[in-house]
Amino acid sequence: VQLLESGGGLVQPGGSLRLSCAASGSIFSFNTMGWYRQAPGKQRELVAVISSAGSINYDDSVKGRFTISRDNAKNTVYLQMNSLKPEDTAVYYCNVYWGRYNYWGQGTQVTVSS
């Protein structure tokens, strides 16, 4: 299984970015895909996850600003990030898991700075 992320970059505070992650390989239909992030000197933390049935969870820090969605036919998950803040700066990692299987993308840098 491979996860290919795209969409990171540099944005000013208050701006928006959209991350995409396409999964390829032998993927079980019933899975959970999501985004995690890791800022310098901090542990990796959950941002948002979405199951193949559409169940969604967000970290409280991004509720109302970020929206996660997925296209099951394309095995792709998206993260629309609005009203970005400097504290959102981190490497964002895509993840997919089911049962005992757990896969990570290589990460994409998101920097929010003026």
Image (cartoon, rainbow, N blue to C red):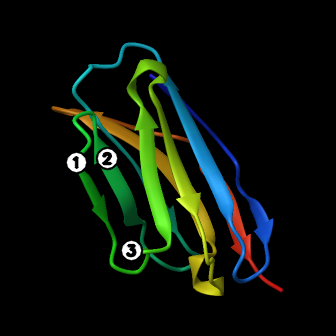
The mark found on residue 50 in the picture is: 2
Q: Quadrant of residue 39?
A: bottom right
Mark pair 1, 3: CA separation: 15 Å
Tell me if mark 2 has few (under 14), some (14-19) or many (20+) residues whose alpha carbon lies within 10 angstroms of its own.
Answer: many
| Mark 2 residue element | strand
Quadrant, the N terminus: top left
The residue identified by callout 3 is 63
Mark pair 2, 1: CA separation: 5 Å
Where 5 falls versus 2 (above or below)? below
Mark pair 2, 3: CA separation: 14 Å
Give the image location of residue 43, x and y in percent: 42, 72
Point 21% across, 26% down: residue: 30
Give the image location of residue 94, x and y in percent: 48, 46
Q: Quadrant of residue 70?
A: top left
| Mark 3 residue element | loop
Q: Are marks 2 and 1 in contact (CB under 8 Å)?
A: yes
Q: Is residue 46 left or right of residue 101?
A: right
